Amino acid sequence: MSYYPKQEQETLYLFDVMDGNWRVHSTYPPHIRKLLDYATIIDTETDENGRVITATGYVDKNQVRLFKPRL
């Protein structure tokens, strides 16, 4: 079960032009699990049971891809 209701779950990718880094923040459980495995984590928040409910970190630029969608 998720800590946040569905309408409050999100994943944000933010690009810092000055640093050239992608920062990611998520409250969506499947994305949190991937971030914990693949990102450089800078901050997490846990619930009373010790489960991570938010994660913030940096990902490498080759882990983010913008492309023309298929039609």
Image (cartoon, rainbow, N blue to C red):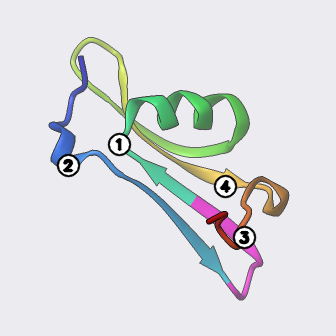
The quarter of the rendered structure image containing the C terminus is bottom right
> Which mark is nearer the camera, 3 or 4?
3
| Residue at x 43%, y 47% (from the top left corner) | 26
| Residue at x 80%, y 56% (from the top left corner) | 60
In the image, 20: left or right of 52?
right
Say above or below: 16 vs 57.
below
Under mark 4, the amino acid is Tyr
Task: Work out whether mark 3 precedes mark 4 in sequence or the reverse, and give the earlier one.
Answer: 4
Q: CA distance from mark 1 to mark 2?
A: 8 Å
Q: Which residue is mark 4?
A: 58
Instruction: State yes or no: discs 1 and 2 in contact (Cβ < 8 Å).
Output: yes
Quadrant of res 69? bottom right
> Which mark is nearer the camera, 2 or 4?
2
Question: In the current view of this chain or complex, which residue is farthest to the right?
Answer: 62
> Which mark is nearer the camera, 2 or 3?
3
The quarter of the rendered structure image containing the N terminus is top left
Badge 3 density bin: few <14, some 14–19, many ≥20, Cα 10 Å = few
Give the structural element (helix, strand or loop) at label 3.
Answer: loop
Q: Which residue is mark 3?
A: 67
Q: CA distance from mark 3 to mark 4?
A: 21 Å
Q: Which residue is mark 2?
A: 8
Under mark 1, the amino acid is Thr
In the image, 21: left or right of 33?
right
Instruction: State yes or no: discs 2 and 4 in contact (Cβ < 8 Å).
Output: no
Q: CA distance from mark 3 to mark 1?
A: 25 Å
Q: Residue 36: x percent and y percent?
A: 60, 31
Residue 28 lies in the magenta stretch: no
Residue closest to the eye, 33 or 18: 33
Look at the image and give the residue range highlighted in magenta. 17-23
Q: Which residue is mark 1?
A: 27
Q: CA distance from mark 1 to mark 4?
A: 15 Å
